[in-house]
Image: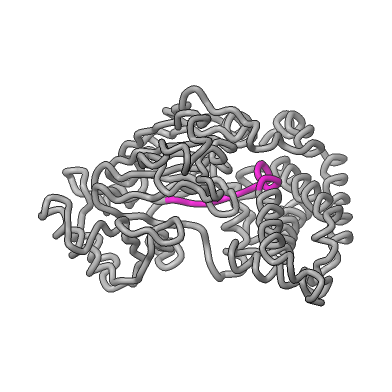
Amino acid sequence: MDRETLGACSSLVKLDHQPCAQLQPSHFLHYIQTEIPYSQFFSKHLLPNRPCMFSSNFTQNWSCRSRWVGQDGKPDFHTLLQEFDETSVPVADCNTKEYNSNPKHSMSFRDFLSYWRDYIQNGHSSPKGCLYLKDWHMHRMFPEHHAYTTPIYFSSDWLNEYWDTLDMDDYRFVYMGPKGSWTPFHADVFRSYSWSANICGRKKWLLYPPGQEEFLRDCCGNMAYDVTSPTLQDQRRFPRFSEARRPLEVIQEAGEILFVPSGWHHQVYNLEDTISINHNWLNGCNVDVVWEFLQGELLSVQKEIDEWRDTMDSWDNHCQVMMKSCTGIDYAEFTSFLKTIANHRISFLSSRHGNACSETLSALGPHHATFDLQRVAHTLESMLSNEDFKRVQVSALGFNVEELLQKIRDTISKHNTAY
């Protein structure tokens, strides 16, 4: 990021984003054929939260596109089996609905490929149903494979930076599925961004901008499972469906990368036998959207157990526990997450070396690190004024938030003086 871009987005640091429901959809999907400056992607897609597609030029040098794909453009089962063999992988049953998603079970990679071969030979059908290998942490399990390289545009990735620091988990996934496999209507975890690259095969995406999902709820408030289902035409079951805009429909070809912005609900189909790589990620451009989402999740939990509010001494703490079990994170961990991101950038700006993330931070530059600190500070200030956050036990946080905030402000001030 250059100084001009940092200055142009300074107002974002001081003002909240528009509410997601007010964001307008794109009239078309911007197609990026060749490399563009990072600042252009930042200003035209990250900040305004607009989707785009990157051409296959951006993945042509990935080793997985040559190793995992045969000359016919289809998955190379022989090579894939050699690489992953008896590895245990998560597999979803696309024909079964469970809590508005497809239930998963574990099976060996070898068994999944055997199923996939039979599925193709039987005309893309099987008595076992339509199985889809999804949410597989291949990168974490096989880091030595170097199957692909994250494009610079998606490298400001706080989510995976945090989990890599803990060395516990990540949000990098591989998907492999036969023609006809699909993912039901949803928005990504924590309302994060995602990018999805087709290694081979084709996908169809149905994308709805933030706010449109409210028209796709049934009379009980439950989100639609399949937005193409005829049941949505029943006004008694889906009273507001007629108010919904038509989705942005996107066909993604082999090698292309789709950027899906924060809070864009989507439904995805594999039009052919397909392999794809997906990252969920967030950064300074959408951290306030994530914070807003977490507040909404906590409010839902509070409403659910409100009748016990006056009879439980630890009611607020119990709400946090329930929130984490449902969402995957609570206020204390979100604060720890922000602290980790801030400390990496403070270290980088102070010494420019010795940081575990210094390679990425160096590529993005000191102005980007300053922008990140501004966004962390803005979020922490919002959290400190939040009544529910004030009730989080200090022992759960493990550090003084005000002290961290002052440290961030001092670092920003030093950087602004130096530049």
Nearer the observer, 362 or 333: 333
Residue at 73% over, 34% down: 6
Nearer the observer, 26 or 301: 301
Q: Report the coloring of the rendering.
A: one colour
Please determine whether, in this image, residue 22 is positioned above or below residue 187.
Answer: above
Q: Is residue 410 left or right of residue 75?
A: right
Which residue lies most toward the top here? 27
> Is 279 contained in the magenta span?
yes
Give the total number of marks visible in the rendering: 0
Q: Position of residue 317 (x, y in %)?
A: 75, 71
Any part of residue 340 in sight: no
Q: Quadrant of residue 109?
A: bottom left
Q: Quadrant of residue 269?
A: top left
Residue at 56% over, 49% down: 221
For the C terminus, the quadrant is top right
Q: Position of residue 24 (x, y in %)?
A: 59, 28
For the N terminus, the quadrant is top right
Q: Is residue 312 left or right of residue 133?
A: right
Residue at 83% over, 54% down: 386
> Is 84 contained in the magenta span?
no
Please determine whether, in this image, residue 203 is positioned above or below residue 132.
Answer: above
Which residue lies most toward the front here? 236
Please determine whether, in this image, residue 119 is positioned above or below residue 412.
Answer: below
**Region in magenta:** 278-289
Any part of residue 106 in sight: yes
Residue at 42% over, 59% down: 135
Nearer the observer, 260 or 393: 393
Q: Position of residue 290 (x, y in %)?
A: 66, 50
